[in-house]
Amino acid sequence: MAFGMKMVKERSKVMIFTEGTILMHGSGAGRSREEIVKQVIGDEKSVREFGAYVPIGGAPSKMGKWKDQGCSILYLTSRTEPDEVEDIGHVLRRHDFPDGVLLFRREGEEYKDVVERVIPGILIEDDCESIGGVSEMAITRVEPEIRRKISSISVREFEGVDHLPDDLVQLRSMGRIST
């Protein structure tokens, strides 16, 4: 088991989507997941106030446990405008998310392009319910030969990551690896 943990520490990159997976708009706090999805679909005002986003559940703590096991954390935001990307970075720091790299799509890129460039060992993303479902998920569009290298974990949008294992080996094993 110690050897397995050493391998995890040396090689794991955990990429996690921010909005909808670990962050939500401020007015979603205290509401049911279904109400939050309706707010997003209805373009409720605070959905566009990126600097006021809040963590979903105990995401900072959960991710801190993964980071403590030696993985690199890669955050992927849906934002592409520099000031909006900066807002998401400030939210992550303000709410004590573990240090990591905040990635975003460059001009002309899709999410799959970012995933394919980085090739994380574990990819955690939400099911994109409010924007069209599974067909909108990054893993759906990643090239098959690259997809086979990624343990893909899907959570319900705005459900958070609290229910995922603390242990990186268990986390990786629960992911779906496409063949």
Image: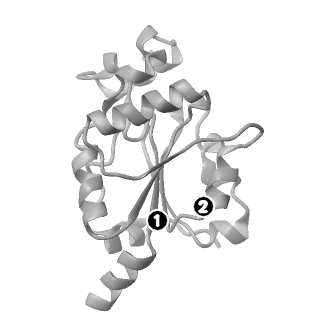
Q: Earlier in the sequence, mark 2 or mark 1?
A: 1
Q: Is residue 136 above or below residue 174?
A: above
Q: Is residue 26 above or below residue 138?
A: above
- In this rendering, position of residue 138 left or right of residue 152: right
Residue tagged 2: 118
- In this rendering, position of residue 161 left or right of residue 133: left
Residue 1 appearing in the image: no
Work out which quarter of the rendered image holds the C terminus and state it.
bottom right
The colour scheme used here is one colour
> Label 1 amino acid?
Lys
> Label 2 amino acid?
Val
Residue drawn at the location 45% of the way across and 8% of the way down:
45
Residue drawn at the location 66% of the way across and 43% of the way down:
135
Number of marks drawn:
2
Q: Residue 148's spot in the image, x, y percent? A: 62, 72
Residue 76 appearing in the image: yes
Q: Residue 169's spot in the image, x, y percent? A: 34, 74
Viewer-closest of 13 and 135: 13
